[in-house]
Amino acid sequence: DIMMTQSPLSVAVTPGESASISCRSSKSLLHSNGITYLSWYLQRPEKSPQLLIYQISNLASGVSDRFSGSGSGTDFTLKISKVETEDVGIYYCVQFLEVPRTFGGGTKLELK
Amino acid sequence: EVQLVESGGGLVQPGRSLKLSCVASGFTFSNYGMNWIRQAPGKGLEWVAYISSGSSYIYYAETVKGRFTISRDNAKNTLYLQMTSLRSEDTALYYCARNYYFDYWGQGVMVTVSS
């Protein structure tokens, strides 16, 4: 199985500042078709997860452009600019290259 | 508006069975693969199973293979998860999610396995 490792475990951010979350996979997520199958999700407290970004950097419908994704191969980053109260929650990365789909352990974002 | 509504959860004894349903609306259900994903209390997310739009492709996590069966009825816009031989470690909030990359999620349904 592909292992997904996120860091940090938690991050505290002052509103208006930026935050970055890292995700590393145990093998490259680049498919032979040229697509890299890595997505990011946010689970707000007591809510279902929601898709933020797919295929490394594509913003999901309705998601604020304060969220951006980057990376390649095995190393990926989610950046949140100008953090707001509604950004609080747990962020997960997921790989879709292979079955079983595997999630990172999550990164908890809190406000200072 | 895409909506996914799970039901069928509850308290069940170890070794017993339970069947979850997920009713979809707001999109053409028969065009999309669907997933079940679970979250144990206070824990992270675990993918459980996937079924393709026409049920030709089905995949399971090793932790549920042989015990759980994913299926769908495209005429009823409904996804199912038949769970048998339930264990305490199956206790979780179960979500259905659309598409291979989980673009929409339901609100989840709780399954508690306990004597």
Image: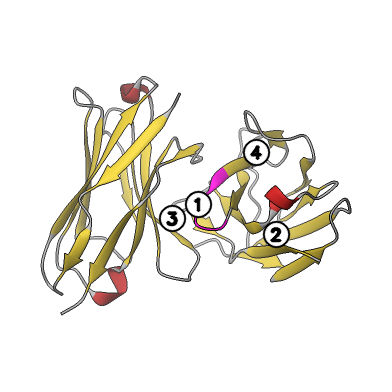
Is A9 above or below relative to A21?
A: below
The residue indicated by pointer 2 is: A23
Label 2, secondary structure: give it. strand
Is B72 above or below relative to B61?
A: above
The answer to if A48 sits in the magenta stretch is: yes
Label 3 to label 4: alpha-carbon separation: 17 Å
Q: Amino acid at mark 4?
A: Gln
Q: Amino acid at mark 3?
A: Pro
Is A102 above or below relative to B6?
A: below
| Label number found at residue A47 | 1
Label 1, secondary structure: give it. loop
Q: First in sequence, mark 4 or 1: give its number.
A: 1
Q: In front of the other: label 1 or label 2?
A: 1
Q: State the residue at coordinates (84%, 55%).
A: A15
The answer to if B49 sits in the magenta stretch is: no
Q: State the residue at coordinates (79%, 48%).
A: A80
Q: Residues within 10 Å of mark 4 (few under 14, many from 20)?
A: many
Q: In front of the other: label 2 or label 3?
A: 2
The residue indicated by pointer 3 is: A100
Q: Are marks 2 and 3 in contact (CB under 8 Å)?
A: no
Q: First in sequence, mark 3 or 4: give its number.
A: 4
Q: Which residues are magenta?
A: A45-50
State which chain disc 2 sits on. A
State which chain disc 3 sits on. A
Q: State the residue at coordinates (36%, 19%).
A: B28
Dominant secondary structure of the magenta stretch? Answer: loop
Q: Amino acid at mark 1?
A: Lys
Q: Position of residue A95 (x, y in %)?
A: 57, 51
Q: Amino acid at mark 2?
A: Cys
Q: Position of residue A46 (x, y in %)?
A: 50, 57
